[in-house]
Image (cartoon, grey):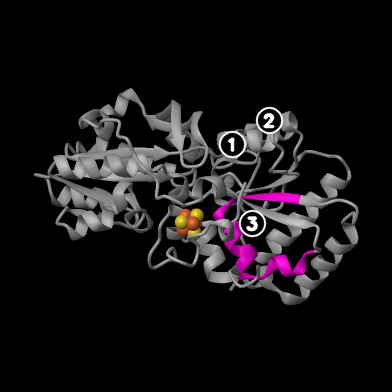
Amino acid sequence: MKYVDEFRSGELAKNISAKIKAAVDPERSYNLMEFCGGHTHAIFRYGIQDLMPDNIHFIHGPGCPVCVLPTSRIDQALYLLEHNDIILCSYGDLLRVPATDGKSLLKAKAGGSDVRMVYSTQDALKIARDNPDREVLFFAIGFETTTPASAIAIQQAADEGLKNFTLFCNHVLTPAAIQNILESPEVREIGSVSIDGFFGPSHVSAIIGSRPYEFFAEEFQRPVVIAGFEPLDVMQSTLMLIHQINEDRFEVENEYGRVVTRDGNQKAQKLVAETFELRPLFEWRGLGEVPYSALRIREKYKVFDSEQRFNIPKLHSKEIKGCECPTILRGAKRPTDCKLFGTVCFPENPMGSCMVSSEGACAAYWSYGRFRE
Ligand code: SF4
């Protein structure tokens, strides 16, 4: 398949692997954080770690939208279902994420609540059009990749005069999260997490471009390489990061040039800017409350904002005891450090969000890497 097979060639992988082995300084280690869950899965699925020298360590970051959503937001969605006659639409992964006291949207559905799995915001709009007498709420999550689709849905609902559609906005921002990791005590004070460079996300960067990473590459003196999701993309990006680290450079380089530009998709950015504004504070699982790291719906579109239409209280949420997702999302632990991994927690019975999502680090370890360590 064009643009896929070329990036999965075993021969080319061996060549890049040899170049990486020749480039590394055996006297030091290279700790490289892949922000995005798509890269974590590529690393495990294609056995990339096996092609690396021992002193290259991949650290898994928080770039999985389902994983970083805090329990409190799912609890709030469940509260809305209990107290209002609504149809709640959500992407599939989110339905299985455990909330407080082992509840989940899927269990609420089994209990009679009207929860519907959708594949796009357009599905949710159609449900709203087909059910004019019911309130339809779209539970919107995701990084910059999925935000434009939410912006389009809100603008479309406004154009059509849809009165029964709202969006529960949980869209978050990548550069703010990376900055937060670099400012975390584990990295700055305790030094228990050492990060020498970052793989920049692929799809997010297709929207925002490579420019937004330039500030923190300079400020925190860490190199960033925007990497595609195929195995050769990840390997080539590893080589580019090693060259930068060896040469004491901290630049933003773009390996995924077939999709990502410096300025990104400006049409999508304009749509998002028209529809959303920065939230002063938003809670992330693992990172806590991060200033200006998420979006909310602009005043102009407030009639489509679930948080304006419904009374949504602050709730005291509880994490599953023993689940290490928060620490894993900060790169401070690995899935196999969790006592629940593979014992009571596995994809069919997830105890935490990192085992639910197809992009989660625990799911990647379970599917491809659990026998390695
Ligand atoms: S293995 Fe399960 S319980 Fe442990 S950190 Fe991962 S998701 Fe949480």
Left or right of 155 in this view: 163 = left
Q: Residue 3, image x and y in percent? A: 62, 66
Quadrant of residue 252 within the rendered picture: top right
Q: Residue drawn 70% across and 32% down?
A: 189
Q: Residue 162, image x and y in percent? A: 19, 39
Q: Secondary structure at mark 2?
A: helix
Left or right of 284 in this view: 243 = right
Q: Residue drawn 38% across and 31% down?
A: 296
Q: Earlier in the sequence, mark 2 or mark 1?
A: 1
* Viewer-nearest residue: 118 or 157: 118
Image disc number at residue 175: 1
Q: Amino acid at mark 1?
A: Pro
Q: Quadrant of the N terminus?
A: bottom right
Would you name the residue on which mark 3 appears?
Answer: 228
Crowding at dot 1, Cα within 10 Å, few <14 / some 14-19 / many 20+, comes out as some
User: Does 50 lie within the magenta span?
Assistant: yes
Instruction: Mark 1 and ligand 1: say if the CB distance to the nearest ligand atom is below 8 Å.
Output: no
Q: Residue drawn 43% across and 53% down?
A: 353
